[in-house]
Image: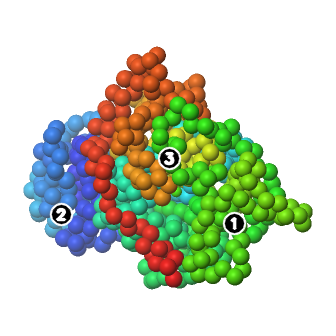
Amino acid sequence: MATIVASACSTEFVNRFDPTILSSIQRDLHFPMNVLRRGIWVTVPEILPPRLKVGRAVPSAPREGDKTRALRTSADVRGALGTARPTTETRPQDAPLIFALQILAIAPADVLRTMPSMKNWSRLIWITLASLAIPLVSGAATRPNILFIMSDDHAAHAISAYGSLVNKTPNLDRLASAGMRFDNCFCVNSICSPSRATILTGKYSHLNGVPTFNLFDGSQPTVAKYLQSAGYHTGMIGKWHLGGEPTGFDSWNILPGQGVYFDPAFIGPDGRRVIKGYVTDIITDLAIDFLKNRPKDKPFFLMCHHKAPHRSWEPDEKHRAMFASRHIPEPPTLHDDYATRTDAIRECQQKVFYDLTRRDLKLEPPADLTGPARNQWLNVKPTEVEITVEGKKQTLTGEALNSWKYQRYLQDYLACVQSIDDNVGRLLDWLDKNGLSKDTVVIYTSDQGFFLGDHGLYDKRFMYEASVRMPFIVRWPGVTKPGTVQEAMAINPDFAPLFMDVAGLPVPADMQGRSLTPLLKGQHPADWRTSYYYRYYHDPGDHNTRAHYGVRTTTHKLICFWKKDQWEMYDLVKDPDELHNLYNDPAQKETVAKLKAELFRLKKEVKDEDQYAYEQPPPGVDGQSAARRKK
Ligand SMILES: [Ca+2]
């Protein structure tokens, strides 16, 4: 005979609820996990007659300053429930969170013996709750599916919905026209693995342990684990790039390290296999397989992570041909002379004119070169290139070569993006055909932005706009008004809280972002952030890019390259291209002082105590691909 065990609790208490409690209860009390999952996260006051209001676990609500208490074991649950007492309190104003944990579990009747204060309660109450609760949690409308599509290094300004001047992306535009486009979504550390760790944990790099390309500690809480524990069927397909094996996913199939564009290897729970074809098509195929094979009685959470359009920008033949002879407009800052800027941008090695290699430019090595000599040839950054135009050989140098390099880079990059766009279309079509679009929140983003020749650069890392701005498009039928644009500032630590919220779960207190749901509903919370904190560590890294931290407000940006104590300040309203460093302008003294105060306020708020300022964990995410390269 099953009986529902219930307890009311405070908001803080709910926020400290640890998903590991589920496995603890399962282990200690021998409950089937699927029953547990069906029995939690239900808001009951609305369905209860007033006289049946449940008890409030007053003594278990943590007090101010009490940071250690958490429900981790079934003993904790018993302790919390044992203190519950009947109450006639009316429902508090913040009831959805306050009562989110009321039904903790469906427990065997004998468990009640450990909860003396509940003995006198009518068992009928619990049975009634059970019968009411289960239908409440089973509807797809209350727990929508989440399809999170993330590409790698796809700049927002290479999406036509964002006003791209260089390409057209009809499928991403289709998503944007049915949902909300975020125009000010930023990453907090503009590099691959750190962004992924932040998205999974809702935390900054200094708290999730991934400041650079180092191994992610898979034992820490992630949004995938929370959703999995709450009954979501979770999947991770494509580029993982956090080292080790994914945790918190019912199904996973990942590229080793960076992965490769053609005939890529994938690693799953059953080992490694090579799949013939083009990586963007294959990741989409695997995502569709996940959707086809999912248990139909559960909502799903699928992270579909593309490799493209990451360097070395290798398109498939179809898309390469589309862009092969296309002239791409140059960005206005391609010839930036870096006047007024600090040393960092001059010293970096991610410049289109100087740092693209023959490999990047797809130049063909002499046929007689093999092995290391061939690699050496491909890794040269050429200052002279011979090309053939209409049967005639030409040697390019200087400005002509610079322009040609930009065209070669963008043609390949955009051709890779075009395949992403096609494949997003395939996924959207599949959802449509299978009647899932209405019940699925679809998100498109990239792990950061990218320089498309902006400031003469490729790659990312810097806190400049093209690098930190992430495309972020959300289609949430019935919640988000189609075709809307969001100006409020979002950051990638917000993604995990958003997924929690979509799934009807309380946002854990240690997640540092904030759920974007109010914005998606068209609300404008008065206390929404107007500034955010950024920190990049990978110095000198692969591109000799100086470590820095900074603050971006809605109008200004302040950057500190802390190892050299060099600063930059930009007025984003008057100078959106960030060409004029105003840090040393006497007229800006007051503005600089205010920005510094805000920078250090935020640094403290996000608990950045310079954990990785001068020393970072060893590399740990590219081992497998490095091993492949050596072969
Ligand atoms: Ca990336």
Q: How is the image coloured?
A: rainbow
- Marks 2/1 in contact by CB < 8 Å: the verdict is no
State the CA–CA distance, disc 2 to disc 3. Answer: 57 Å
Q: Which of 332 and 13 lies nearest the eye of the viewer?
A: 332
Q: Which residue is mark 1?
A: 362
**The CB of the residue at mark 1 lies under 8 Å from ligand 1:** no
Q: CA distance from mark 2 to mark 1?
A: 60 Å
Q: Position of residue 409 (x, y in %)?
A: 68, 56
On-image quarter of the N terminus: bottom left
Q: Which residue is mark 3?
A: 347
Find residue 74 and name its label: 2
Viewer-closest of 227 and 629? 629
Which of marks 3 and 2 precedes in the sequence?
2
Q: What type is the residue that disc 1 sits on? A: Lys
Asked if ligand 1 lies within 8 A of label 2, the reply is: no
The image shows residue 505, relative to residue 336, as above or below, that is below
Of residues 524 and 55, which is closer to you in this image?
Answer: 524
* Callout 3: SS: helix
* Spot occupied by residue 326 in the image (x, y as percentages of width and height): 80, 54
Q: Could you tell which of marks 2 and 1 lies nearer the N-terminus?
A: 2
Badge 1 element? loop
